Image: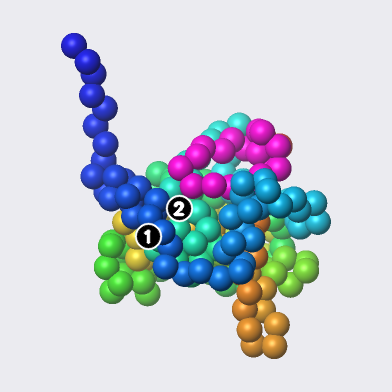
Amino acid sequence: MAKHRFINPAFLFLLLLTTGCAIHKDPYQTKLKLLQKGKVKDDTSFVYQLPFENNTSKLIVQGYFSSFSHRNRAALDFKMKRGTNIHAARGGVVVRVKEDGSKGGWNRKYRPHGNMIVIQHEDGSRAGYWHLQFNGSLVKVGDTIQQGQVIGLSGKTGYTLFPHLHFLVWTTAKGNWQQVATRFQTSKGIKFLRPFRRYKRVD
């Protein structure tokens, strides 16, 4: 008798939406798609470390400009259980921490409850780590962080359908902000990560 695998309805819903055509189109999005597919090479940008334990792997459930909730974001969502250690993808100084949020769900009213850590890098860019659990920060504003250091615990706070880590890098200049595509060291080399694929951290 054939075995049937149960598919979580929420994940199926996310899969259907994120594989559709994104509404937001701009030159940066096009460039990112080419970088992800390896059709355009980049050997100049900083190489980030995957933000979880060494020798473990995580699934990317949303990638850059995915049509579910990343239409205008060059962000990555790593599926993580609550309480999973989050590691700094790059070293820097902690400039913002929020960990007093205790609510989360698929409703915009939960957005203000999202916990996060923001780290500023030496080149002025910043990385945000969102949806941490209540009291889930292991660092404080002003701390100097090393790449790979444990900085917090994942959760499901804020505007989110399920527990995961939302990761985004950006720069600001003259009041304008620009999202930054991030390439990572993985077990299969340096990659721009793509949705619905698992990536293993190997230092």
Residue 129 among magenta residues:
no
Colouring mode (rainbow / by chain / secondary structure / one colour): rainbow
Q: Which of these two is toward me, 163 or 103? A: 163
Answer with the quarter of the image where residue 95 lies.
Answer: bottom right
Q: Would you call the spot at circle 2 few (<14 residues within 10 Å), some (14-19), or many (20 or more)?
A: many
Residue 182 shown left or right of residue 134 in the figure: right
Q: Residue at x 65, y 39 (%)?
A: 186
Q: Which mark is residue 68?
A: 1
Residue 111 shown left or right of residue 77 in the figure: left
Q: Which of these two is toward me, 136 or 78? A: 78
As drawn, which residue projects farthest toward the bottom?
Answer: 174
Q: Quadrant of the C terminus?
A: top right
Residue 199 among magenta residues:
yes
Q: Which of these two is toward me, 98 or 110? A: 110
Image height check: is 124 above or below 35? below
Residue 130 picture location, percent across and down: 48, 62
Q: Residue at x 64, y 61 (%)?
A: 31
Residue 58 picture location, percent across and down: 50, 40
Which numbered disc, 2 or 1, marks the residue that appears first in the sequence? 2
**Tag 1's secondary structure?**
loop
Q: Amino acid at mark 2?
A: Gln
Q: Are marks 2 and 1 in contact (CB under 8 Å)?
A: yes
Image height check: is 179 above or below 76? below
Q: Quadrant of the N terminus?
A: top left
Specify the segment rendered in magenta.
Answer: 184-201
Residue 171 picture location, percent across and down: 67, 73
